[in-house]
Amino acid sequence: MKRILFLTLTLVAVLFTACNQSSKNKEMVKKDVFGSRDGKEVYLLTLTNKAGNVIRLTNFGAKITWIEVPDKNGKKDNITFGYDTFNETVNGDMSYGSVPGRYANRIAKGKFTIDGIEYHTPLNDGPNTLHGGSKGWHSVVWNTEILKESKIPAVKFTYVSPDMEEGFPGTVKVSIVYSWTDNNEIVMDYSYSTDKKTIVNVTNHAYFNLHGAGNGDILDHIVTLKASAFTPVDSVMIPTGEIRPVAETPFDFTSPHAIGERIGEKYDQLILGKGYDHNFILDNKDEVDVTVYEPVSGRMLEVITDQPGMQLYTGNFLDGTKTGHGGKPYNYRSGMCLESDHYPDSPNHPEFPSTIINPGETLKTTTIYRFSVK
């Protein structure tokens, strides 16, 4: 009799815990209809951690569209680019906060070769393919799953990229899990596989301004980037193949420097990129690969990744024609990107780390954005 009573009480406790966890997840992740695209519903998902801080995601392009964190005085503001409505999102810059693919960054002349077969991809960046083409992963509707068993707010987006989509071979199954921890970390866990030998390069393309998105420029942001070398580019922003040490150049962020401190120097790579728009070769020796500190607000962003490269882009082509949340214009150098990925044009540079994936393999990678104040 006692055993039956104990088992009954245990079952009740388990059911209560499960119901309680399900209820907590409903509070942690709110799902609203944002719009529709290609006959599929697009959602806006609001994730709230125990500190009451909020990020927002959408399954259109698997985007981060809002990151609201406090400054050193406790004042909260959104510090990433995005739009208030789905119509603005579709008609605006679709790279903001997205997961571009199938190949993030540039491919020279929109062509590459695998096992003697040459493949051609759309040219959407002068003579090159950028971020997988104009109809890449940033512009499709991903499947959405709220991870109800997670103890922290978490959402999983999945997409099946068909064979020869935008010219890339193989059917690729890709997923990203966004988790929003109580330590104000966005953990991004990527996973992908293929049925045919192909190339994949994944990243997130969030723009950051630690003053608050649309509030001034990012030239006073102090960057520490643990990279002893970078990949110089030619006139159309394709790596030349050179691996250049950062020492004694304006690209040395191994110790802290403000972005604006040297960005105007007459250095060949700054002239070609009209600022920083380059892949840094990460040392991958320390836990934190990049630290960005904004002294007025006291906000700090740390980036942790297992990827070999980090594309630092300083908003050199922002011109104020795009307006985001609250109607704020995104002006010249008002945002910066830190794209953890493989090197640009790796398929055409066998000396670079490979982006080839074979059938039967499942590749995984993780990047974390950690926010704090000091």
Image: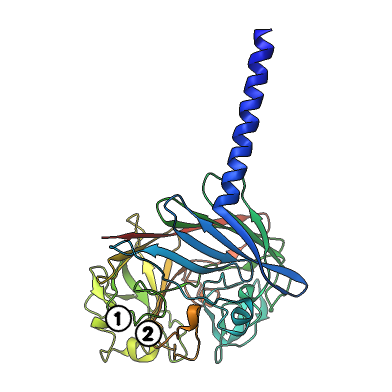
The circle on residue 299 is none
Where disc 2 sits, the SS reads loop
Answer with mark 2 or mark 1, whichever residue precedes in sequence.
1
Tag 1 residue: 219
Q: Quadrant of residue 158?
A: bottom right
- Regarding residue 149, the answer to whether it shows in the image is no
Question: Gap between marks 2 and 1, in whole Å?
Answer: 7 Å
Q: Position of residue 38 (x, y in %)?
A: 75, 75
Q: Is residue 139 left or right of residue 82?
A: right
Q: Which mark is residue 333?
A: 2
Q: Is residue 55 left or right of residue 374?
A: right
Task: Point out the image quarter for the C terminus.
Answer: bottom left
Asked if residue 338 can be seen in this view, the reply is yes
277 over 291 or under it: above or below: below
Give the percent coordinates (x, y) of residue 204: 51, 68
Question: Does dot 1 land on a helix, a strand or a loop?
Answer: loop
Query: Which residue is at a point 62% across and 43% down the rendered structure image?
Result: 22
Question: Which one is nearer the viewer's eye here, 81 or 272?
Answer: 81
Residue at the (58%, 41%) spot, across then down? 21
Residue 16 percent coordinates (x, y): 62, 32
Q: Quadrant of residue 92?
A: bottom right
* Towards the viewer: 42 or 194: 42
Q: Residue at coordinates 43% horizontally, 56% vertically from top-left?
A: 185
Q: Quadrant of residue 208?
A: bottom left
Spot the residue most to the right.
Answer: 39
Residue at 34 percent across and 74 percent down: it is 211
In the current view of this chain or complex, which residue is farthest to the top? 1
In the image, residue 191 lies at what x, y percent?
59, 57
Marks 2 and 1 close (CB-CB < 8 Å): yes
